[in-house]
Structures are given as C-alpha cells and as structure tokens.
Image (cartoon, rainbow, N blue to C red):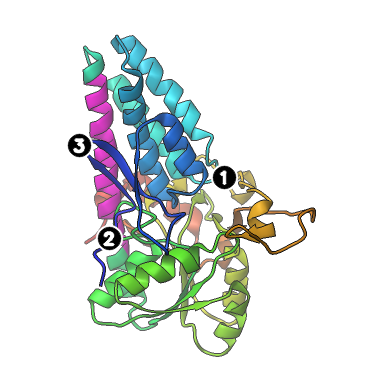
Amino acid sequence: MRAAVAGVRWDVGGLVIVDQRRLPAEVVEWRLDSVDEVADAIRTLAVRGAPAIGLAGAYGIVVGLRQVRPGSVEAALESVRAIEERLRSVRPTAVNLSGSLARVRRAAVASGATSPEGVVAAVLAEAVAIHAEDRDATLAIGRHGARLLADTPRILTHCNTGRLATGGDGTALSVVYALAAAGVMPQVLATESRPLLQGARLTAWELRAAGVDVRLIVDSAAGAAMSGGLVQAVIVGCDRVAANGDTANKIGTYQLAVLARHHGIPFYVAGPLSSFDAETPNGHAIVVEERSADEVRGFGGHATAPADVPVWNPAFDVTPAELITAFVTEAGVLEPPFGPSIATAVALGAGNATP
C-alpha cells in the first residue's frame, strides 16, 4: 500500500504540489517558484479541489513575495494585493481560493510588520494556519459523516474529494476513510467524472492506494446502479455553497441528486465551512467556470469527436438545496431548513465543532 499523498505541502524550500495531471500513471511533485507557476498549476488543474487551491493560493502569496523581494513594508503590502488579484481570477467558482487569499492579505495588513521580511513571515504564518485548520476540519467531517453513514456502507461519490483535494483526509472521502478506520468496510462506487475523469484518474487511484473497496463506473451508469441496489447513499464534495444551501460542485452532481431523490436515496454534501459563502444568496449568483472545448473533443492527445463540433463545457453545476438531505461539516451535520442551519454554523465557526 502506498503512503498517503499530500496534494499540497510547504517545506523550507517553498510550495510543493503533486501534479495531478500526471496521475494515475506517475506521482510527480512540482515545486512552484513563481506566481506564474502557481497560477498555471491552479488553472490547468495540476492542483485542484476547492480547499487545495485555497491553500495553493495562500502559499502562492508567500511565493510571490519571495520572488519580487520588495524593498519596503509598503511595497510588500502592495505586492500582496497584486498577487491576490492575479490569483483570485484563475478559478472563480470555488470560494476557498478567494477566501484564503483575502484572509492572507488581511493578516499581512494587520501584522504591524516593520520590515518586508516581517510581512513575509506574517503571510506564511497565516497560510500555515489555514492549512492546519483545513486538516482539522477534514478529520471532523470524517467523524461526523462516519456516524451518519455507519449503516449505509454502499456509497456513490463523484469527482475527487480526498487527500489530493484538501489539506487533510478530504471531504466526502474523509467520511470513507473514517468508516474504514471504524471497521465498517465501505463499498464505494466512483464515477469517472467527466470531462477530466477526476474520479477515474484520482479517486480510484487514491482509494485503491488506501486499501478501500472501490469500483469505477461511467457517469451514465449511476441511475442503473441506484436502481439495482448498489447505492445506499450518495456523498459528494462542494466548491461553493450559497447562503440558502444551493451548491456548486463538479458537473454531473445535479443529475446525481435528481436520481437519488427519485430512488429514495439520501444525498449528502460534505465540505468545510470555508466553502460556505454567506455573501452568495443562492445558486443563481454562483459564477460557473467553463473550460476548453478541447477537453471534450479529445483525451490524452487523441481526438474523440470532430475537431470543429461546438462544445459546451461547464466545469460545475448547481444542485438546488431542496435536493440535498444534509451537509456534513466540521461543525456537525446541517439539516434543513438550510438557511438558518448554515447561518448558525458559519456564525459559530469551526472552533465550536463537536468532537
């Protein structure tokens, strides 16, 4: 069994990611030494998963400050703002990226640093704190979710929501890991997750490496799997949750929620409170990223469709709150009505998470 892989980490030399574009064929780490490299890694999905790109962005400000070597505190703070602006626009749907960048910038301004080196130290300390909080949040999500799904071990999940996508054990996959640790022996159906096959390339690889029972299915087999009794619960991650509970996640999540409702199967969304956006009232206000048509016209350098066929390639869809059974967060399980339960959890914060 392979050792657990950390998708994002900081060492003395700087920011290191696992290049997820290379999986499952090989595990390749990439040290990011410039803001351009951080932006490119996020844009091209070398690093992906809402919490993980938030961490990459936070550490990316440190990378940028080391790169430009500002000569004064004022220049350092201006560089922080410029780097934040540059990185924030790379992936607009996941709120963790903009949230982490803003948090690091506020820490820099509030630090009272008297030298550029002091600003760098404050920024790095805040990025490390965000990473530690995300790691703790994923463990709490796993504990809460394992209690919730203890009697429903036949689980369907979508995209990748594990150690590659977060600073810890993951969101939906943290629940799977916690179930396995408790001896429940989950049986996971992982969708391929079109168009970039993140379920096939990443989730199947990650779960097999962890010794978890996983079977891969094409996205369009989910309904048949539910009808055939292969699924007792669906649990997915989230890139942004609106104040009313509408949730943006990998394209295909919405149809899974509709299928689950039809078959009477609970549909859970797992995510840290950092993915909940009180400033976004509902799903209509969520900006959904669209990606290159070439990701659908071909794969692995081989054409799978006519080169000139028009393509609509949204990276995410929005699942209405009424199709969601509950949210699993570090603060506990949030149940309908989601407006009040989300507002209360966000107001209390992760520091009040129950053990």
Answer whether residue 61 is magenta in the image.
no
User: Main structural element of the magenta stretch: helix, strand or loop?
Assistant: helix
Whether residue 138 is in magenta: the answer is: yes
26 or 113, which lies in front? 26
Q: Position of residue 257 (x, y in %)?
A: 58, 69
Q: Is residue 335 above or below residue 79?
A: below
Residue 354's x, y, as percent? 24, 59
- Lower position in the chain sequence, tag 1 or tag 2: 2
Where is residue 40 drawn, in percent x and y?
Answer: 48, 39
Query: Mark 3 or mark 1: which comes first in sequence?
Result: 3
**In this rendering, the label closer to the viewer, 1 or 2:** 2
Residue 335: in sight, yes or no? no
SS at badge 2:
helix
User: What is the three-letter code of the residue carrying label 1?
Assistant: Pro
Q: Which element carries disc 3, helix, strand or loop?
A: loop
Instruction: From the viewer's perspective, tell me whether residue 302 is left or right of residue 208.
Output: right
The residue lying furthest to the front in this view is 302
Find disc 3 in the rendering and name its residue.
Answer: 12
Q: Which residue is label 2 attached to?
A: 140
Q: Quadrant of the C terminus?
A: bottom left
| Quadrant in the rendering for residue 82 | top left
168 vs 39, left or right, is left
Q: Which residues are magenta?
A: 118-141
Q: Secondary structure at mark 1?
A: loop
Q: Is residue 322 above or below residue 342?
A: below
